[in-house]
Each structure stands twice: as C-alpha cells, then as structure tokens.
Amino acid sequence: MANYGYGGGYSTTSYGAQGGAEGGGFMGGSQQGSQDSPGGSRTYGKDTLRPVTIKQIIDSVQPHPDGDFKIDGSEVTQVTFVGQINSVSTQTTNTTYKVDDGTGLIEVKQWVDSDADASTAKPQPKEGEYLRVFGRLKAFNNKRHVAAHLIRPITDYNEVNYHLLEATAVHLYFTRGPPEGAANGVKNEGGMFVDSGASNGAPAKGGKLPAKITGVGRKVFELLQSEPQNNEGLHVNMIAQKLGVPSNEVFKAGDVLLGEGLIYTTVDDETWAVLEY
C-alpha cells in the first residue's frame, strides 16, 4: 500500500502527475482536462492519485466550477476505483460505461482514438465484467462522471477486496490521521486474500516484470523507473534517443506497458511515467 504519511498529504511524485485528462490517455485525446488553476497556471506538481469508492466521488465537493474536487477535505485530481459494468453505451467519439462498486453508480467515459489500428485493438469490456479505472473527476451540467485514461479488466477478485480496504485506509488517514506506531511494512502471516501470484501497478526497483514484457519493453520500463525525471515523465523521442532504439519500436513497447498498467500517459499521449501505487 502506498505511503500516505508525510505531513497530511499523499504522494504526488510517485505517480508522475499528469495522467488522466479528458482526452482518454493511451486511447488518444488532448490530455488537457481541468489542470489549470483559477489563475491560469498549470498545477502539474499538485496532481495526485487516490483510491476511492464511487460514493466518495458522488459526495466529493467542488469549490468552484474550475476547481479541483475535494474528498475528506483534501484535493484530488486523479482517482482509481474498481467496479462492475452495469451498462455500455458506444458512440462515435467515446464509450460510456456505467460502473457500480456497491456504494454507488457513476459513468466512466473513455475517448476513442480514430487513428488506432483496429487489428490490434483490445476487446471492449462487456456488461457484468469487473474493471479498474484510472481517471479524472469531471462535472458537466451538474452531472459527474470520470474521464478515464486507463481501464483494465480485473482477473482476480482479490483486487476488489484489496481496493476497498485501501480506500478505507486512506479515508481513515485523512479523517482521523495516521495510526499511532504504524509499522512500515505488513507482516505476511496469511489473511483474507488468496495468493494467485497476480500483482498490480509497477514492481519495485529490482522487482520482476510480467513475462510478456521482453526486449525493448523492459528497457523502456527500466529507463522510466531509473531516469531522473520531472513531474511530466519522459517523451517517446527522448526515450528512443537514450536507448538508441527507433521510435516505432518504443511506441510498440509502450502500448504493451500501458496495457499492463505499468506506465501511463501524462501531458500527452507520447509522454509516459511509471505507475506506482
């Protein structure tokens, strides 16, 4: 679980910062979203990623139309949650999923990349399936939705239980403060989860990547994880230059890493950062 204990905030640098704008992330789009402060200046460094429930999204407060939403009194820009697809509505420019996690129901919009190669497109999620969503809170005509920059299927139901526990822990941190004498690690002596060997997010430095990540993909990931970066991550051209690899090969590797939820897009579809949580 991520570390939420540094002076009342939660980690911004671990998450890179700018993923999940209205454009739909690796599915294509502008990647601009509502990242401007009221004064017009960019607030990339303040971006955060927080595990939440849908009820928390519905109950969140937006101080003014251009402001960031607040949950438990703290600003949130990017959120992640899990849920079951209640319905799917496909349009020319986007696909809308109604997702239910047992605490509420919300629409999740994912924008369509019209230039994507249909032969390599992944199957569209179907009603009844469980998803993990990464995205930004949006409001239009007083109706809230989540603009997704990454949607991936859940193959291990333990992830649903894990997420609800993590969202609860973070909620308690912001409402009651950090637990006294909390240990830095969690001792593994059994518990409510079945060990299926699955993992979520990026592995720690030196950890193992999924077997399907080979060759250029591993080099790209290792560079993103080790290279000193600003809050925006690294652009594809910079990655290709540093690795001495053609850009098209970097793009192919990036598609696999994005699909596995190991990296995510930041300021545009060609700038990536490692997803750690």
Image: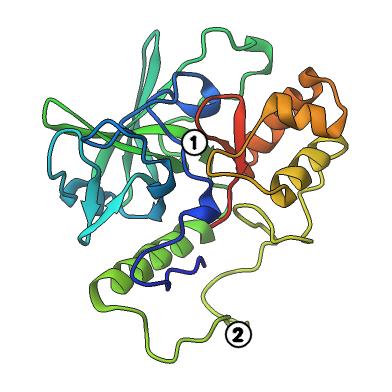
| Residue 112: x %, y % from top left | 47, 16
Q: Can I make out residue 213 in this image?
A: no
- The residue located at (42%, 71%) in the rendering is 6
Residue 44 in the image: above or below residue 101: above
For this view, does 171 lie left or right of residue 23? Answer: left
The Cα atoms of the two marked residues, 2 and 1, are separated by 31 Å
- The residue located at (25%, 78%) in the rendering is 176
Residue 10 in the image: above or below residue 176: above
- The residue located at (81%, 42%) in the rendering is 218
Which of the two residues, 174 or 94, is positioned nearer the viewer here? 174
For this view, does 37 lie left or right of residue 218? Answer: left
Residue lying at the far bottom in this picture: please name it. 181
Residue labelled with disc 1: 151
In the rendered structure, find residue 160 and report the number of the disc placed on it: none
Q: How many marks?
A: 2
Residue 256 in the image: above or below residue 225: above
Q: Identity of the amino acid at label 1?
A: Ile
Q: Identity of the amino acid at label 2?
A: Lys
Q: Secondary structure at mark 1?
A: strand
Residue labelled with disc 2: 187
Label 1 environment density (alpha carbons within 10 Å; few <14, some 14–19, many ≥20): many
The quarter holding residue 207 reads bottom right
| Residue 258: x %, y % from top left | 63, 35
Which of the two residues, 272 or 193, is positioned nearer the viewer here? 272
The quarter holding residue 53 reads bottom left
Which comes sooner in the sequence, label 2 or label 1? 1
| Residue 81: x %, y % from top left | 39, 49
Q: Secondary structure at mark 2?
A: loop
